[in-house]
């Protein structure tokens, strides 16, 4: 036997000997009884969550784990090394690892927990359990000198992290992320970064650190992964942030107080960084060309960073790049053609920027591309032309394509496009400018498509290729030119998988029998559909949103609508021809949040159950019907109710004081009814009330502020009390409390308007105005057509955001206060048909934005002052004042115009308000930013609430239509 053979023999002999010895050892040795007891005592302190937590269940599933009671098989009769989640040393049987993640644990981690008694413990994972209100015990830092991995993420820990946790000398991995109640003092965190010499991975997502970034970053050189997203970091990014020797992952996203320019990359280093995420930061400037030196990058996310300029050409150097997310910035220019030659590029998110020009030819042959999202840019040109025909697309791996909200031109045949994208799951061409055609040949192209959005694509028929899409879940064909009946075969689309269907704003006249029993969202509004309410809708037991508004449905709501009562959240049948009493089946809709029945022919008495439909109800609009009787009392807390619209009915009685329970109420419209009683002073206690419309009722008496109410109506923006029988003085104390009307800050962007139609003038004493276009941001006070008397308070001049002020058709006396000149944003002022005296204050003539003025039928005297807007008004604005003279009246003044000595009355003597003319710029603010067209209509449904409902719905539905693509 040679020497080499002898060595081989001896090696094998010792190997099998040791293996047999260890096998024999493990067969006779179990885990330490004391360690088993320690774990059983820990189990005894914990309780298992009885009901499955939907969030944790889905989160664990996303991580490839199972949310289950992991300690179920822990008992004293079995070897603890065989318990779920327990790992023992192969030779000594010491417990070295505990993984209880997703274990359905609930309770408190006490400082004396027996987990700290395990001397050889190396890894501890308690992630995705519920230790609500527990603090991380100091003893973690003394638990084991052997601990290398500690994962306490998403456990709902709270309180301040003690410095003791950083006494673990061998720690390699530390994850405290997604514990929103945790805090770490900046100095403690700074010591952590410097003293953990072996630490390789550190994640503290969502922990409150508030650390001010230093100019030079001094952290452990061993660190390979650092995630400090959503931790409140502040300051500029350090100059050396990309120069860390071993750092491969750097995520600092969602720290909006990170400022300054994007750091330049030191090109003299070989930088190992592979994943960089600085999204949602307040950076400035352009993306530097030096970014292309991060040649190891495979993931780059700079979304929502306020970046400007064009894409650096050096991006083509990132040969390992798989994901590029530059969305929600202000980037412009064209897309570099070489970007799509990167061999590993899979996911491109460039949406919501200002890119322009055509799409490069290279994009259509990027075989590795899986996700392409370019919506919300300014791309233009005909994609399907010249060297870019649809038939030549080579994107076989593409699963998501979104080109919506751009300026493309040309025709796209849906069949040809889909046949070239065999793996496509999501396609959105809505508002892209493209005209989508279909050869209407029955085709089985791309049966796996799940989400299809073709809003505003000039479709004239239902694309027959939809018939083959058996897995379709969302379909949006809104804002097209589809005419006639929906074809019967449309029922085959998606089978029972279809969840979302939007056919709104077309010219559809008829419906088939629906078979989409699994549908969650159905939008049919603004078509030409006639006939009775479709009873097949009653079979959609999962329906959450039903909108059939603005059609010609007739008849009554069938009782079978109660079949969807367990799921329905938004029900909108407004603007049809539906008759009959209030549908009692609605009262069983316990999840209902929005109910709109307005502009129909409902009649009868409102049922008592209306006051107790749902604890989650936020809007009720049953205006412009024929309901009569009293308004039902609110029996339960209505804390979610924000809008109650009952206008345009024949309701009687007093306004129920039970509405005082509705502390979230923002808009209350009871106008155009037959209500009586006095002004509901208790409404002043509603802190969020912004719109109050009581016009055209039979309310009477003075409007007095009760001594028990302080700061009444602090949020008020629209107050319309016209056409009632209120008497006494104008409510000065209320006017003083209208804080929301005193806000003079304005968005400097281009004014936005609601097109209200009609002419450009108003009649004296009408109480309702009519403008061809109304600013979106309307602030209104309308006390017209009552019996108010006394002086106009100068305090009205402090309501500097007022757009409309109407005090016409009352018995007001005294002069026009010059303080009205402080209303620098006012567009409509009507003081007609009163008994006002004195001269017109010159300051009123200086109001820059005044478009409508009516001072007629008073006792005003003297010369009509001249001003930029005053010079445009006709004689009818000043008629019926026999002692007024000067243009535009035919009566000439006898004395020369006084330039500096004209007497001006300051109302209550509350002068001293310094004002200046502000450039008009109305932005879209809160819910009530869309309110203010209402008083422009003398009858009918309030147009301001149409704006709220329609725009709000469209915003919500637009968000719903887009599928979130995770990073």
Image (cartoon, rainbow, N blue to C red):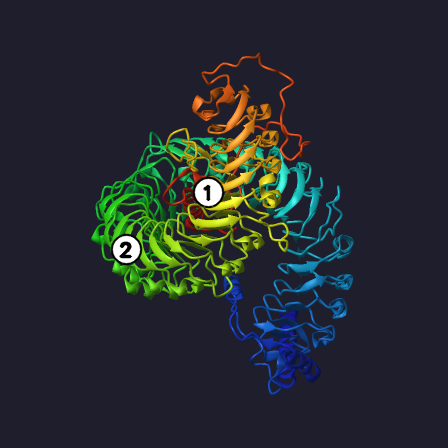
Within-10-Å neighbours for mark 2: few <14, some 14–19, many 20+: some
Say above or below: 935 vs 224.
Answer: above
Residue situated in front as seen by the camera: 337 or 69: 69
Residue situated in front as seen by the camera: 793 or 103: 793
Eye-nearest disc, 1 or 2: 1
**Residue 125: horizontal and vertical position, in percent?**
63, 67
The residue tagged 2 is 579
Residue situated in front as seen by the camera: 621 or 855: 855
Task: State which quadrant residue 746 falls in.
Answer: top right
Identified at 28% across, 55% down, the residue is: 579
Identified at 71% across, 77% down, the residue is: 114
Quadrant of the image containing the N terminus: bottom right
Q: Is residue 949 visible?
A: yes
**Residue 236: horizontal and vertical position, in percent?**
70, 41
Q: How many marks?
A: 2
- Say which element carries label 1: loop
499 with respect to 643 (left or right)? left
The residue tagged 1 is 722
**Residue 636: horizontal and vertical position, in percent?**
49, 65
Identified at 40% across, 65% down, the residue is: 609
- The CA span between labels 1 and 2 is 30 Å
Q: Is residue 345 visible?
A: no
- Say which element carries label 2: strand
Say above or below: 134 vs 189.
Answer: below
């Amino acid at each position: 036997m040679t020497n080499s053979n002898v060595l081989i023999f001896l090696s094998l002999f010792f190997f099998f000997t040791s293996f047999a010895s260890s096998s024999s050892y493990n067969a006779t040795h179990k885990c330490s009884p004391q360690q088993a007891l320690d774990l059983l005592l820990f189990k005894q302190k914990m309780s298992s969550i009885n009901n499955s937590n939907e969030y944790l269940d889905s989160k664990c599933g996303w991580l490839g784990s199972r949310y289950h009671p992991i300690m179920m098989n822990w008992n004293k009769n079995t070897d603890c090394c065989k318990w779920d989640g327990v790992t023992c040393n192969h030779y000594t049987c010491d417990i070295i690892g505990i993984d209880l993640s997703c274990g359905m644990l609930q309770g408190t981690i006490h400082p004396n927990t027996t987990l700290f008694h395990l001397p050889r413990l190396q890894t501890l994972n308690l992630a995705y359990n519920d230790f609500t209100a527990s603090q991380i015990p100091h003893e973690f830092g003394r638990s084991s000198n052997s601990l290398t991995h500690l994962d306490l993420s998403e456990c709902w820990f709270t309180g301040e992290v003690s410095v003791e946790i950083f006494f673990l000398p061998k720690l390699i991995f530390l994850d405290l992320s997604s514990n929103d109640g945790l805090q770490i003092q900046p100095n403690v965190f700074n010591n952590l970064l410097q003293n953990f010499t072996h630490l390789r991975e550190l994640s503290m997502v969502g922990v409150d650190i508030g650390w001010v970034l230093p100019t030079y970053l001094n952290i452990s050189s061993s660190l390979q992964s650092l995630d400090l997203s959503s931790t409140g970091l502040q300051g500029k990014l350090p100059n050396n942030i990309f120069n860390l020797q071993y750092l491969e992952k750097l995520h600092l996203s969602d720290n909006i107080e990170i400022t300054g320019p994007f750091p330049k990359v030191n090109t003299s280093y070989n930088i190992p960084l592979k994943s960089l995420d600085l999204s949602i930061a307040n950076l400035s400037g352009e993306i530097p060309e030096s970014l292309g030196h991060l040649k190891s990058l495979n993931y780059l996310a700079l979304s929502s960073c306020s970046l400007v300029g064009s894409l650096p050409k050096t991006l083509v150097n990132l040969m390992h790049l798989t994901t590029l997310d530059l969305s929600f910035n202000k980037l412009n220019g064209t897309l570099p053609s070489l970007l799509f030659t990167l061999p590993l590029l899979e996911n491109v998110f460039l949406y919501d920027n200002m890119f322009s020009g055509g799409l490069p030819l290279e994009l259509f042959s990027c075989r590795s591309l899986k996700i392409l999202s370019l919506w919300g840019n300014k791309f233009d040109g005909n994609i399907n032309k010249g060297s870019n025909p649809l038939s030549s697309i080579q994107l076989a791996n593409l699963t998501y394509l979104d080109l919506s909200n751009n300026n493309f031109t040309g025709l796209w045949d849906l069949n040809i496009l889909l046949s070239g994208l065999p793996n496509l799951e999501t396609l959105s061409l809505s508002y892209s400018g493209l005209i989508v055609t279909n050869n209407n040949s029955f085709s089985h192209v791309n049966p796996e498509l799940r989400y299809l959005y073709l809003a505003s694509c000039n479709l004239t028929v239902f694309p027959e290729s939809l018939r083959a899409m058996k897995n379709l879940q969302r379909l949006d064909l809104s804002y097209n030119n589809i005419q006639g009946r929906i074809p019967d075969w449309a029922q085959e689309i998606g089978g029972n998988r279809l969840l979302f269907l939007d056919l709104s704003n077309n010219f559809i006249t008829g419906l088939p029998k629906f078979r989409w029993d699994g549908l969650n969202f159905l939008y049919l509004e603004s078509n030409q559909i006639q006939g009775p309410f479709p009873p097949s809708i009653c079979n959609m037991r999962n329906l959450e949103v039903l909108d059939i508004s603005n059609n010609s449905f007739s008849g009554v709501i069938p009782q079978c609508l109660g079949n969807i009562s367990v799921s329905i959240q938004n029900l909108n049948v407004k603007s049809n021809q539906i008759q009959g009493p209030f549908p009692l089946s609605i009262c069983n809709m316990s999840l209902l949040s929005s109910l709109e029945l307005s502009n129909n022919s409902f009649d009868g008495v409102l049922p008592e159950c209306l006051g107790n439909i749902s604890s989650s109800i936020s809007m009720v609009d049953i205006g412009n019907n024929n309901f009569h009787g009293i308004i039902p009392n609110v029996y339960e807390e209505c804390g979610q109710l924000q809008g109650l619209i009952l206008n345009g009915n024949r309701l009687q009685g007093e306004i129920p004081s039970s509405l005082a329970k509705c502390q979230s109420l923002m808009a209350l419209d009871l106008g155009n009814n037959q209500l009586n009683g006095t002004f509901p002073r208790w409404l002043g206690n509603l802190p969020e009330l912004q719109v109050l419309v009581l016009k055209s009722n039979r309310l009477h008496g003075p409007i007095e502020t009760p001594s028990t109410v302080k700061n009444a109506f602090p949020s008020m923006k629209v107050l319309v009390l016209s056409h009632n029988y209120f008497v006494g003085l104008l409510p000065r104390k209320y006017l003083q409390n209208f804080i929301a009307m005193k806000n003079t800050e304005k968005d400097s962007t281009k004014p936005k308007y609601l097109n209200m139609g009609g002419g450009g003038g108003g009649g004296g004493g009408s109480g309702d105005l009519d403008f061809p276009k109304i600013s979106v941001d309307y602030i209104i006070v309308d006390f017209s057509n009552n019996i108010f008397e006394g002086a106009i308070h100068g305090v009205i001049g402090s309501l500097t955001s007022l757009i409309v002020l109407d005090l016409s058709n009352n018995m007001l006396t005294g002069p026009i206060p010059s303080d009205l000149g402080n209303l620098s944003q006012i567009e409509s002022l009507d003081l007609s048909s009163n008994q006002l005296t004195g001269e017109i204050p010159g300051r009123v003539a200086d109001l820059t934005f005044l478009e409508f003025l009516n001072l007629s039928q008073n006792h005003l005297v003297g010369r009509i002052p001249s001003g930029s807007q005053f010079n445009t008004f006709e004689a009818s604005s000043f008629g019926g004042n026999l002692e007024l003279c000067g243009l535009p009246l035919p009566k000439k003044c006898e004395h020369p115009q006084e330039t500096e000595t004209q007497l001006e009355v300051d109302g209550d003597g509350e002068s001293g308000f310094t004002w200046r003319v502000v450039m008009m710029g109305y932005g879209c603010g809160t819910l009530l930013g869309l309110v203010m067209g209402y008083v422009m209509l003398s009858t009918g449904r309030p147009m301001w609430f149409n704006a709220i409902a329609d725009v709000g719905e469209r915003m919500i539905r637009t968000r719903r239509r887009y599928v979130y693509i995770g990073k």
